[in-house]
Every structure is written in structure tokens, then in C-alpha cells.
Amino acid sequence: MKPKQITVTEPLLPPLEEFIPYLERVWESKWITNNGAFHKELEQALCDYLGVEYISLFTNGTLPLITALQALDIRGEVITTPFSFVATSHSIWWNGLRPVFVDIDEKTGNIDPDKIEAAITERTTAIMPVHVYGTPCDTERIQQIADKHGLKVIYDAAHAFGVERNGVSILKAGDISTLSFHATKTYTTVEGGALVCHSAEMKRKIDHLKNFGFENEVSVVAPGINSKMDEVRSAFGLLNLRYIDSAIEARHKIDTLYREALRDVEGLRMLDEKIFEGVRQNYSYFPVFVDAERFGRTRDELYFALKEENILARRYFYPLISNFDTYSALPSAAKENLPVANRMAEQVICLPMHHNLSEEDVCRIIDVIKRR
Ligand SMILES: *Cc1c(COP(=O)(O)O)cnc(C)c1O
């Protein structure tokens, strides 16, 4: 008999009986979408929780990226990282723009600020970095470069819900940041997402763009799209906000267990805790990087050894976005241009990480990793 399955993640589900009264309110109101009461309430609650001024809810985490590029009127080329989920580059593609890949920093997995300037051409108009695994980018350096060259900055903050540096939300960096509330993310509304901006005027523009461009009943001010969040998921999100802190705390404990157990394993690298100084983390993922020669097994051998024990880890982010057919012909996608990203994509494995993982589960995982 196979041992109990351990999944890489598990959705944050509020107690069902607590959700019922919310649904009753939606049914009674007969207002199930289009900026209803729960939608408004969740936008305000998220502003308060995240410590930001303007949030616009979306139906998933990809449409706010696409809409951000629209709202800022981005043209030509957008500098981005290949070490992310495909939606980052896809949002650029969907706007008829060209992604330009820049290599990443070995220590964080984020875009390497030292390599951005060399990729800027006269067609460059924006930078789209990702706070990968929720680790903050070097936002100060990136802003300096953007200011010097007159570029906009859009952060894909899909992994960075609740992340702060020195007490300030990481979502305040750049012109716009976007979040994903997909079921696999730390905070979820089933499917869902949000866009964070820094002025009432921009928020108004975004709200028009996500609703076909309607300004009022008779006036359409832009060729908008439909990416509104509905009342049922807004309610789900409101209820889940009550549980997010304890979920993050549970993840923190798992993170500590992993770190202590894996500290001295030859050939396994974890993200260095030094990069989290002054950072309020959300412990979204637990990536480890396998140096096959020193570890004695390749990353894939470890991945399948875990699978054999019914432990489902994920090779996030492998393959690299730049190696997918859609993008691999771009000059910036060449492997020689992205040596660090290619290496990290070959080495990475994200261990199971979620609020319901038990200490016993973690021990089972560690046993398989340490087994020779
Ligand atoms: C999950 C994710 C997205 C897309 O979010 P969806 O809600 O699934 O559309 C975008 N970027 C990154 C880095 C992600 O991990």
C-alpha cells in the first residue's frame, strides 16, 4: 500500500459553515457580480490588510498584468525575468509587445539589477520584475534604473501577498503591482487576483478597463476587457482574510523545520536567510537547489524519489519561460544570455509547503531527501 499522499500545496479553505451566511446574503441581495457589496468590502479590507491605498479586484492574476500594461500605455519592449510562471511573459505577448529576458540573481532568483541596463534599447518602455517565491526584488535599484531611462515598472507580485520590507508593503514599489489569488497561492479566492496602484485616478482607469471601458451607462472611455470579480468569490476572500495570518504562521513553522533539518545536507542549497533581513515573509514556497555532483542525485532523481513515496514536489520554475517554444526564438532567450536562470531551473525543486502540512509529513519528506 502506498503511504498517504502529500501534495505540494493545499488551498486555504474557510470553514464551510461560516461561508453559508455569506452566500445567504448574496442570494438575498440578488446582486451577484458588478461591483457589489462584498466586492467593495473586500477591496477595502485588502487595502487595510496589505497597507496600500488603491486596490482593484480581478477575476484572476493574469488579467491585472495584461491590464497594467494597457493602463500605462506600454509599447515596444518590456524587460522581464524568465524565472517565473508563464503568465508573466504571456501578459506582455497578449499586448503585442516583446518580452526581453534578463538573467537572474543567484541569491534571490529575482531579476539581476546589474544586468538590466545592458538590455535597454530605444524601444524599451517598461520593466516587469517578479518577486519570485515572495522574495522582494531590489526595488530601489530597479527604480533608479527606471527613472534614469524613463521606464515604467510593473511588479508581478503574485507570490508576495502580505510581504513587507522594513514595515512597508512591497506592493508600494513601482507604478503597479499585481497579485494572484489562485487556489495554489497562499491567500486565495478560488480564482482571483488584484492590481495595486498609487492614485485614485489610476484606480478609476483600471476599474474602467476591467469593465469593458464603461465609465457610465452610456459612455465607453477605452477598449476594456471583462475581468471583474464576482460576489461569491469576493465573499470567499473576505472570509479567508480571517484565516490568512494563522495560515502564514503555520507555513513559518514548516519553513523552520525544513531549514533546521536541511542545513547540513551536502549539495542542497536553500535561499539564504540573510536576504530576508527586515522582511515580513509569507512562506509561499520552499525551494531548494540541488547540486547533483555534491548531493549524489540529480534534481529529477530526487523529484521521482519523492513521487515514489507519494510526495508531490514541484519543479518551479522549470522549464524556464525563455525555453518554451513561444519565446525560445527571441534573441534574449538564448541560453548564453541566461546562464544563472538556466542553472537554477535545472536545480530547483519546491518542497511541499502549506498550512495543513504536519510535522510528521515534514519528517517523511526529510527522510526521503536524506536517504542515500
Ligand atoms: C500564479 C501566477 C500568475 C497568474 O495568476 P493566475 O491567478 O493563475 O492567473 C502570474 N504570475 C505568477 C508569478 C504566478 O505565480
Image (cartoon, grey):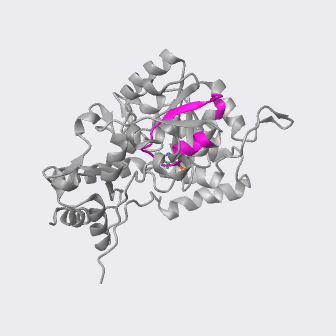
In the displayed orientation, state which residue is furthest to the bottom. Answer: 1
Q: Nearer the viewer, residue 233 or 323?
A: 323
Q: Is residue 239 above or below residue 45?
A: below
Residue occupying image coordinates x 33% and y 40%? 340
Left or right of 212 on screen, residue 310: left
Asked whether the viewer can see residue 197, the reply is yes
Q: Position of residue 216 (x, y in %)?
A: 81, 35
Magenta-colored stretch includes residue 81: yes
Q: Nearer the viewer, residue 281 or 89?
A: 89
Q: Position of residue 164 (x, y in %)?
A: 38, 33
Q: Position of residue 129 (x, y in %)?
A: 46, 35
Residue occupying image coordinates x 62% and y 55%? 232
Find the magenta span and give its range.
Answer: 70-93
Q: Nearer the viewer, residue 352 or 56?
A: 352
Asked whether the viewer can see residue 283, the reply is no
Q: Is residue 310 above or below residue 92?
A: below
Q: Is residue 280 above or below residue 245?
A: above
Count numbered badges in the picture: 0
Left or right of 362 on screen, residue 11: right
Left or right of 36 on screen, residue 221: right
Q: Position of residue 70 (x, y in %)?
A: 66, 34
Q: Quadrant of residue 280?
A: top left
Residue occupying image coordinates x 42% and y 39%? 162
Which quarter of the figure is the N terminus placed in? bottom left
Left or right of 120 on screen, residue 307: left
In the displayed orientation, state which residue is furthest to the right. Answer: 218
Q: Nearer the viewer, residue 58 or 355?
A: 58
Q: Quadrant of residue 211?
A: top right
Which quarter of the figure is the C terminus placed in? bottom left
Magenta-colored stretch includes residue 363: no
